[in-house]
């Protein structure tokens, strides 16, 4: 489904109306193409702190060109600033000193990353300064324009060696529709961080080679794209969907060389059946993506029991029960990754979706509850999509759909692949200290925190 408004803004008449009426002018977002370099251009690095000296080396391992000095000529594709050394409010001027002179030197679809220390691990003036970084990055994300993104990555003391996969994701077109987000690395480890806790990959282009990934609701839409991206990254995909979607699911899994299982995930024996299949057919699973979800919208005054119960059962109860069964059966391999799909509705709420919003906020609680309980290096995180262009959103009335697409810093809807790329970042073995996060894939929606 194409964005007709975006196409209109590129016409001669559209350009005039955009300029004179101050209408949104969405930029064409760059998205990752298989085999392309992570960053097509140069990244300027700077700052002062415990990560500053190693930044260039990290980017070099990703094949990303970097420089500590602004080039006299040419444009920059990205900016990375180490703010871990800012220990007081007076030190925050370093942000202005670094960014202001170079913002006009950015190419289209630039990427900006600020690195800090989790405030909850600090005290006094340093805690204050580090918390201030959130307001700075979120505001810059709404200013940067040109399809650009801005993120804040809090790196716990001792987790400096675990930043590479996150930098690769956030500096590349894989994060095209992710902006204004706060990521924590090493904040939920249950103890001191060890280098052995970070996974290694033989082929950075296919980090999931030899891994098994289970994806629920995999036959179409966002689930299909998650399956495709995980397969692209080397995983063997086990797709799960309802019996009514069997033909679509089987066709997709045959195309990807994967496996499939058809069942109702809310069935009483579904968790046991899934765990049994995973253990007997694959010897365990490395990535679990709870993507399956439904909507049954009505205002609460008109909400019947069936609508409420079905949404809670599919979107929230099933992921929890399946996860617990997989863990109890030892079916999740060490350093595995569990990923939930929440929603911006679970953060900001939505009219007529009390059941859906409750279920998706519950997914965030699901992450919070498990993050500090998991062992063997297993992580749990979630994505929270905003307005993603799918068959479901295509059925939304035109006016409502247009408003939904424009209420974000990028003035456009996202694509299913945008959600899939965030899932693949979580699943990367090198992201094994990325735990307990909920990252919105919403183009920095104006609603919600």
Image: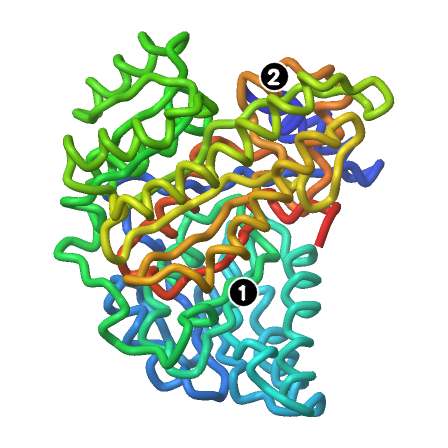
Q: Nearer the viewer, residue 364 or 108?
A: 364
Residue of label 2:
394
Q: Nearer the viewer, residue 205 or 241?
A: 241
Residue of label 1:
105
Residue at 60% of width from left, 45% of height from top?
Answer: 443
Q: Nearer the viewer, residue 68 or 335?
A: 335
Q: Quadrant for the C terminus, please.
A: bottom right
- The image quarter in which residue 315 lies: top right
Can residue 76 be seen?
no
* Rendering colour mode: rainbow
Classed neighbour count for the residue bearing mark 1: other residues with Cα under 10 Å, few (<14), some (14–19), many (≥20): some
Can residue 305 be seen?
yes
- The image quarter in which residue 349 lies: top right
Q: Nearer the viewer, residue 271 or 61?
A: 271
Horizontal arrangement in the rendering, residue 399 relative to residue 317 (left or right): right
Residue at 16% of width from left, 36% of height from top?
Answer: 282
- The image quarter in which residue 14 lies: top right
- For marks 1 and 2, give the CA distance: 37 Å
């Amino acid at each position: 489904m194409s964005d007709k408004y975006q196409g209109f803004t590129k016409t001669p008449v559209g350009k005039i109306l955009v300029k004179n009426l101050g209408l949104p002018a969405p930029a064409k977002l760059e998205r990752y193409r298989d085999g392309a370099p992570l960053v097509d251009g140069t990244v300027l690095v700077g700052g002062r702190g415990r990560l500053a000296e190693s930044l260039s080396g990290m980017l070099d391992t990703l094949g990303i060109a970097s420089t500590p000095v602004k080039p006299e000529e040419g444009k920059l594709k990205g900016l990375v600033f180490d703010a871990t050394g800012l220990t007081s409010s007076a030190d925050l001027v370093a942000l202005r000193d670094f960014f202001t002179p170079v913002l006009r030197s950015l190419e289209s679809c630039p990427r900006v990353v600020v690195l800090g220390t989790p405030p909850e691990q600090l005290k006094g003036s340093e805690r204050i300064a580090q918390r201030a970084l959130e307001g700075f990055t979120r505001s810059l994300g709404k200013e940067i324009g040109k399809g650009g993104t801005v993120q804040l990555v809090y790196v716990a003391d001792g987790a400096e060696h675990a930043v590479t996969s996150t930098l690769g994701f956030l500096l590349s077109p894989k994060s095209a529709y992710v902006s204004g987000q706060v990521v924590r690395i090493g904040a939920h480890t249950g103890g001191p961080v060890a280098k052995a806790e970070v996974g290694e990959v033989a082929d950075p282009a296919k980090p999931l080679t030899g891994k098994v990934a289970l994806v629920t609701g995999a036959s179409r839409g966002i689930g299909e794209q998650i399956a495709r991206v995980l397969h692209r990254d080397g995983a063997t995909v086990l797709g799960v969907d309802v019996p009514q979607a069997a033909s679509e699911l089987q066709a997709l899994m045959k195309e990807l060389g994967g496996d499939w299982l058809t069942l109702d995930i809310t069935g009483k024996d579904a968790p046991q059946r899934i765990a049994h299949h995973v253990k007997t057919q694959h010897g365990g699973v490395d990535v679990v993506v709870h993507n399956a979800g439904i909507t049954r919208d009505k205002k609460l005054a008109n909400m019947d029991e069936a609508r409420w119960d079905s949404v809670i059962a599919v979107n929230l109860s099933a992921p929890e029960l399946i996860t617990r069964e997989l863990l109890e059966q030892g079916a999740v391999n060490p350093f595995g990754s569990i990923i939930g799909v929440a929603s911006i509705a679970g953060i900001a709420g939505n009219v007529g979706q009390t059941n859906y919003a409750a279920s998706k906020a519950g997914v965030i609680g699901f992450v919070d509850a498990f993050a500090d309980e998991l062992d063997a290096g297993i992580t749990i995180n979630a994505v929270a999509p905003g307005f993603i262009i799918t068959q479901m959103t295509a059925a939304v009335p035109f006016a409502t759909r247009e408003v939904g697409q424009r209420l974000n810093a990028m003035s456009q809807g996202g694509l299913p692949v945008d959600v899939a790329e965030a899932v693949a970042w979580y699943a990367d073995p090198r992201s094994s200290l990325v735990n307990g996060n909920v990252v919105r894939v919403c183009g920095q929606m104006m609603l919600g925190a």
